[in-house]
Amino acid sequence: MVVSFLVVLFALLALVESISYGFYEIVVNKNKPGGLILIFLTIIGFAFAVTMYFIY
């Protein structure tokens, strides 16, 4: 139970960090395609990591 909570918490923190960096790429560096791809892949990676953890 505690391990599951920690896994999801760590995944959420990584998700927030990566999405915020994606927005930084879009706003500050004016790299819209790169930022959008980063955000898209981050969400897919988050869903994959959490799903695989709870399946196995």
Image (tube, rainbow, N blue to C red):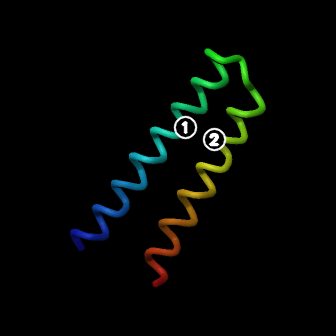
| Farthest bottom residue in view | 56
Q: Residues within 10 Å of mark 2 (few under 14, many from 20)?
A: some
| In the image: residue 54, left or right of residue 21 | left
Residue 53 percent location from the top left of the image: 45, 74
Tell me: residue 8, above or below residue 13: below
| In the image: residue 9, left or right of residue 25 | left
Q: Nearer the viewer, residue 43 or 21?
A: 21
Which residue is depicted at the point 52% across and 40% down? Answer: 18
Residue 24 percent location from the top left of the image: 57, 23
**Residue pointed to by mark 1:** 19
Type of amino acid under label 2: Ile
| In the image: residue 25, left or right of residue 4 | right
Q: Are marks 1 and 2 in contact (CB under 8 Å)?
A: yes
Residue 3 percent location from the top left of the image: 26, 70
Type of amino acid under label 1: Ile
**Residue pointed to by mark 2:** 39
Which residue is depicted at the point 59% across and 27% down? Answer: 23
